[in-house]
Every structure is written in C-alpha cells, then in structure tokens.
Amino acid sequence: MEITSITFLIPVILLGTLHPLLRALAWRQAALAGLNLVCAAILLRTWPAAAALLAFLASGYAMALLLRRRPRRAYLAGYLLLLVGTFAYLKNYSFLELLLPSGLLGRGLVWVGISYMLFRQIHFLVDQYQGNDDPLDPWTYLHYQISIFSLVSGPITRYQDFHEDWHRLEPTWASRAELLTAYARIWIGVIKVLALGALCNHLYILAEPLWTAGSSLTELQRWSRAACMFYAYPLYIYFNFSGYCDIVIGLGRLYGLRVPENFHKPFLSRNMIEFWTRWHITLGAWIKDYLYTPALRATLTWFPRTGANLAFACYFLAFFVAGVWHGSSWNFVLYGLLQGLGVSAAKLWEMFLTRWLGREGHQAYLASRPLRWAATGFNFHYFCLTCVVFGLNVPALRQLAATLTARP
Amino acid sequence: MTRGDVQTRLTRVFREVFRNGDLELQDSVTAKDVAGWDSLNHVKLVLAVEAEFDCRFTLREIGRPQNVGDLMDLILKKVG
C-alpha cells in the first residue's frame, strides 16, 4: 500500500470529504479508527510483526499507567533501556555484531514506522514520568501510535496535540479556500513524489556504475555521474519525503487532524544547526527536547563553570543518535558521525566568532548577505556529502571511492 | 507572589545570564530580541530561573514559552 497510490488516495480522500458530515464525534472517531486499523493491518503483513506491535503498544501503555501512579526514574530508565535495546535487536543494527555472538543476532522483525513509533513512545513516557497531566486512555493512545497520517514516515507527532484533535475531529479550515488548499496540497505532494522525486531518483541511478562496475568509465563519465549522484540524491530525498509530508498534512486536515509541518526551505539554512530546524522539523524538535536539552542540562549542572564549553559535545551526541536512528547498517553510523560533526562544528564556529568579533561583530556577520549566501552554499554541499553516505552501504562506498580515485 | 515580583526577579536573572545590565523585559520579548538567546543560553536561563524561583520545569515546559510573557505565566503557575 503506497501513500501515493490511487488505491489509497481516492478512498481516503472520499472518506475525508464525507467525514465532516458525520455529526457525532463518536462516528467521526469510528470512521478514522476504521481507516487506521485497516491500513495498519495491510501494512503489518505478518502475524509475528502484529504480535510484536501489540506487545510494544501494550507494554508502553502499561508503563504509562505505572509512571502516573509511581513516577520513579528506575522504572522509566529500565523500560527505555529495554525498549531501545529491543528496537536495536529487532532492526538488526550492525554494531550488535561487536557485542553479541553471531548465534544470538536476530533475523530482524520490524513493522512499518517502527522507528517513528519508538520516538513517539519515548516522548509519551517521559512526559508521563514528568507529571504532564495529559488525559490517558488506551483508545486515543492506540490511534496516536498507528494514525495513518504519521505511521509510515512520521511526522513525529506529540501525544498532547493528537489527544486534543482526536477528541474534536472538527474541520481545520475556516473557509472554502483553505479546504481547497488542503486538497491542492495532497496533489502537490503526489507530484513531488511521483514526478520530481522520481526524476531525481532516475538521475541518481545513472550514477550507479560508480559503485558497482565503475572501472570501465572514462574520467568525464565518472565525474559527471558523480555530480549527478551528489546533487540528485539529496533532491530525491527532499521531494520524496516532503511530498509524502504534504500528502499526509493535506489528508489530516480533511479529518480534523493537525499534522505538523516537517519541511521549511531547508536548503536555505546557513549551518547544520539551522538545517535541522528546517529539514525533518519534527525529528529536530524531538532530538532537541528529549536528547540535547537533557544532555546539556546535565552537563551544565555537573560542570557549572565549564559546561557551556561542552555544549558542542551535546550537539554531537544528539545528532549522532539522530543519524544512527535512520538505519541499521554501518553507513548510518558514518552518517551520524557526519551529522554530529556538522552541528557541533557549527556551534564551535559560532562560539569562536562571538569571542573573536564580540556580540556586535557577530550580529554584523550574521546580517551580511554575501556571507549568508556563502554559508548557505557551503552548508548545502555539506548536506549533499552526508547524503552520499546515507544512500550507500559500506562496500558500495568503498567501490565509489576506488572508482573516483582510480587513475584513467 | 505577584506578576510584578516575578518580572523584577526574572529581569535580574536575564541580566545575569545574558550579561546585559540594561536588559528590560516585556511580555512580548522573544529570543530574537535578546542577543545571545540561543539554545545553549536558553538552558542556562532555565537553570537560573529554577534556582531563583525554586522550581523545576519538565522537558515539555522548557520548550513551550514563546516569549517572556509565557515564561512568566509558567513561573506563576509553578510557584502558585
């Protein structure tokens, strides 16, 4: 079941168009619940995956109830350790080869959207532990986790926002124009995925000989294909992912769900810190709220005098984890390293400039348009570099390096 | 504690954290209006506010205030 397929879009849009006509909230919830459950059943595919998902959801809700009554750090820490460890095991992360005997390594048992569910679960439980008084009920929690408008590839929604919408499910548009905008956004998303993204993917695939059988290429062919790969792949990811987000945001509006924005002109970012506030925005926000802020807070508490100088390390840690979260093979460890390096270097550069130029000088630097464009161009190319690692496994990366450095 | 009390004490905290003795706070002041109010200094500010008002913010509350007015509302809610 593809989000961009006619077999998915037409029924969901039709149901979304009729949805507001259901007068009672219970009916609107039932219709959306039916949609979520049918889609989840189609996407799960196997009974073991369904059983694993059920265990994941049931244990998460049970832990939330326990944390409500007894908000003990040991309970939360123990469950999160188990959760993350199980996640790494089920996704068959490559680094487990270093920790476990080969006989214990799993074959992999995952369901679609598991990575996004993990982050939603952590947010949900940490907030419960910290005493946020969100109303709890299993039906809302279930649909928070399996909502078709965030299941497949996010966005990473927050429980409190979903709860508010789920118990209202009223039209989110104030005028006919806004409603038409929601419909238009769906189809713009489809065009992004099926046309623009597909075109960029085609250009990317033209470069495939570079990492498969590159030795027969001339130097011109090698470098022209390298340029294709370098620029086309990030654009492919952008059109594919932002297009998907356009679709689910537009669809969500039809049903009364406010699906959060996930992209805002990311290639205009001047550094990687800004980049993660514009690209996969909900992931950047989650990383900031649940990794970076707690890490920095602990650092500043334990090292009150020198902690500020260690902020870049907190950036590195947080975005290294963000990188590794994207995939289980070793190239994602490289991707995480590059992401961590990018944001921590941006922080160090900012700290250096502030000390060198002073506050006013730094403000003047930030206000300079030529410098901004230079920084934006550099940052875009840095992101393209990280995408090279994102798209290829380690053997392919080695072949790519060998091909590009081979003498003609 | 009145809102005025909170504003007076919060202004002192802001001036210490951002090293600006001339800083004046209004409800509408945001991070863009204060030089150096980035994510690092935001956490430093949170720790300083917690120490000043003897309270503790959850992770959700740390990210919630959009301006100084929201922060003062949050402090008033915390200290009752």
Image (cartoon, rainbow, N blue to C red):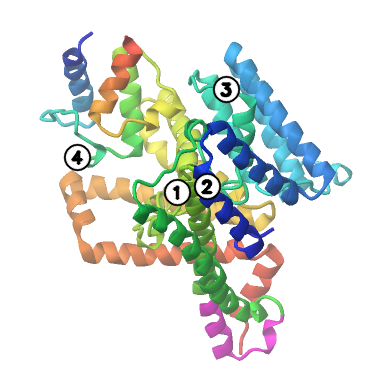
Labelled pair 2, 1 in contact (Cβ < 8 Å): yes
The residue beneath circle 4 is B33
Please tell me which residue is depicted at 51% across the width and 61% down the height of the picture: A243
What amino acid is found at the position of numbered circle 4 in the picture? Asp
| Closer-to-camera residue (A37/A29) | A29
**CB-based contact (under 8 Å), mark 4 and mark 1:** no
Q: Which residues are magenta?
A: A213-230
Measured Cα–Cα span from mark 4 to mark 1: 23 Å
Magenta highlight: main SS: helix
Q: Residue at x 21, y 16 (%)?
A: B6
Q: Where the C terminus of chain A falls, by quadrant?
A: bottom right
In the rendered structure, find residue A155 and report the number of the disc placed on it.
Answer: 2
Disc 3 packing (10 Å; few <14; some 14–19; many ≥20): some
B60 relative to A332, above or below: above
Q: To which quarter of the image does residue A198 belong?
A: bottom right
Q: Nearer the viewer, mark 3 or mark 1?
A: 3
Residue at 55%, 78% (x, y): give it.
Answer: A226
